[in-house]
Image (tube, rainbow, N blue to C red):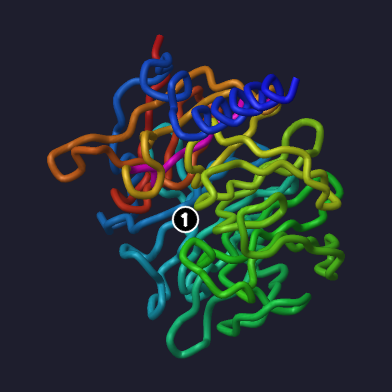
């Protein structure tokens, strides 16, 4: 009996290890519902170059917004608008908001009233911008700020490189904090999920630096499923973590790669974009977009990364959105701009 237990334990551990270290059945070889990438699809006024980005989101009236880091990789000294409303028919930017507000605009969310939320995941050298979450009206009026501009920290009044922000059906605000957790080694490094009331009062928080349940190494993006469960893209732990809204841990899923961004639609179809898998960060895995179910975790489709002479191993973005037109959109950090994938007939 003792030997039998050892064999069973070995099989279980070996299977778990194989599943977490190989993308067989979760990547290349699965159906791709979309055509080749159209790089730099979105266009800014006056031919201005689109900067790096991590966010593309949809609002309650099918309006699509995207982050644009001031034609570069940051917005430190720029007053250019960092968030753009896009025309899906032409790819042209209709309106820009958020000029002069950010250092490193990162997380993007559009709430049920059409208001735009942006997290700023760094700070300017002069300490005048960064480490905040800002709420805008659709015309660009500042409605709320959380955190102190340019000042990192923890607790209810400060953020430490906030990665993303999302609101629930009651208007409560969930913030993923700790972008630098990807490389942090100090256990005191602040990384967590923080929850505020709809009027900005601190309610609760959970998490710390680590690899266990409820611990994070770069909680890069957030999404809710139809049951109200919170999915966290725990990027440098190469997993999605699932919680209830009080912070109770439910599950972790490793089959979606090294998640940078995710989107869950009303049917619980989940789109997860992997910008970082490679032989060093996540051996045996490929960058790209995995599509599956938030209900059972099954991966059913894979959109491959962009491959060219400069990026022979492929490159993928950090934000992902299935558009109301049936096409797929990716916010590109390295390649820059917004990539469009046309739905196959």
Q: Tell whether 209 sits left or right of 336.
A: right
* Residue at the spot of label 1: 67
Q: Is residue 345 visible?
A: yes
The image position of residue 80, as x and y in percent, is 41, 69
Q: Is residue 233 magenta?
A: no
Please indicate, yes or no, whether residue 267 appears anywhere in the rendered image.
Answer: no
Which quadrant: the N terminus? Answer: top right
**Nearer the observer, 9 or 17:** 9
Q: Is residue 25 left or right of residue 338?
A: right
Task: State the residue in front, 254 or 118.
Answer: 254
Name the spot of residue 217 as percent of width and height, x first.
56, 58
At a point 62% along the width and 51% down the height, the residue shown is 109
Residue 185 placement, left or right of 338: right
Q: Position of residue 165 (x, y in %)?
A: 65, 56
Q: Which residues are magenta?
A: 267-278
- Residue at left offset 56%, top offset 44%: 57
In the displayed structure, 76 sits above or below 181; it is below
Quarter of the image where the C terminus is located: top left
Q: Residue furthest bottom?
A: 126
Residue 270 shown in magenta: yes
Q: Residue at x 54, y 76 (%)?
A: 130
Image quadrant of residue 73?
Answer: bottom left
- Give the structural element (helix, strand or loop) at label 1: strand
Residue at image point 37% right, 47% down: 332
Residue farthest toward the left in the current orientation of the protein: 309
* Front-lying residue, 189 or 56: 189
- Outermost residue to the front: 2
């Amino acid at each position: 009996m003792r030997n039998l237990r050892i064999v069973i334990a070995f099989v279980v551990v070996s299977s778990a290890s194989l599943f977490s270290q190989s993308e067989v059945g979760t990547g290349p070889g699965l159906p791709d519902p979309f055509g080749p990438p159209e790089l730099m699809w979105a266009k800014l006024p006056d031919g201005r170059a689109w900067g790096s980005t991590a966010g593309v989101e949809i609002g309650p009236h099918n309006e699509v917004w995207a982050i644009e880091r001031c034609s570069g990789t940051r917005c430190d000294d720029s007053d250019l608008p960092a968030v753009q409303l896009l025309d899906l028919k032409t790819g042209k930017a209709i309106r820009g908001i958020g000029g002069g507000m950010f250092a490193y605009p990162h997380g993007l969310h559009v709430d049920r009233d059409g208001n735009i939320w942006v997290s700023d995941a760094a700070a300017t050298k002069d300490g005048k911008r960064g480490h905040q979450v800002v709420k805008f009206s659709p015309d660009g009026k500042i409605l709320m700020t959380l955190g102190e501009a340019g000042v990192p920290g923890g607790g209810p009044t400060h953020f430490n490189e906030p990665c993303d922000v999302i609101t629930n059906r009651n208007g409560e605000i969930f913030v993923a904090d700790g972008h630098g957790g990807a490389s942090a080694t100090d256990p005191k490094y602040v990384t967590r999920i923080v929850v505020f009331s709809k009027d900005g009062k601190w309610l609760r928080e959970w998490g710390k630096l680590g690899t266990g349940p409820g611990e994070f190494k770069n909680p890069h993006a957030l999404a809710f499923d139809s049951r109200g469960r919170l999915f966290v893209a725990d990027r440098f732990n190469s997993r999605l973590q699932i919680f209830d809204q009080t912070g109770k841990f439910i599950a972790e899923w490793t089959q979606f790669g090294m998640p940078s961004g995710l989107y869950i639609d009303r049917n619980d179809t989940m789109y997860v974009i992997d910008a970082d898998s490679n032989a060093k960060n996540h051996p045996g895995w490929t960058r790209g977009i995995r599509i599956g179910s938030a209900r059972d975790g099954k991966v059913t489709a894979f959109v491959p990364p962009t491959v060219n002479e400069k990026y022979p191993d492929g490159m993928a973005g950090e934000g992902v959105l299935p558009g109301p037109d049936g096409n797929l959109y990716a916010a590109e950090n390295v390649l820059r701009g917004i990539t469009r994938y046309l739905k196959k007939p």
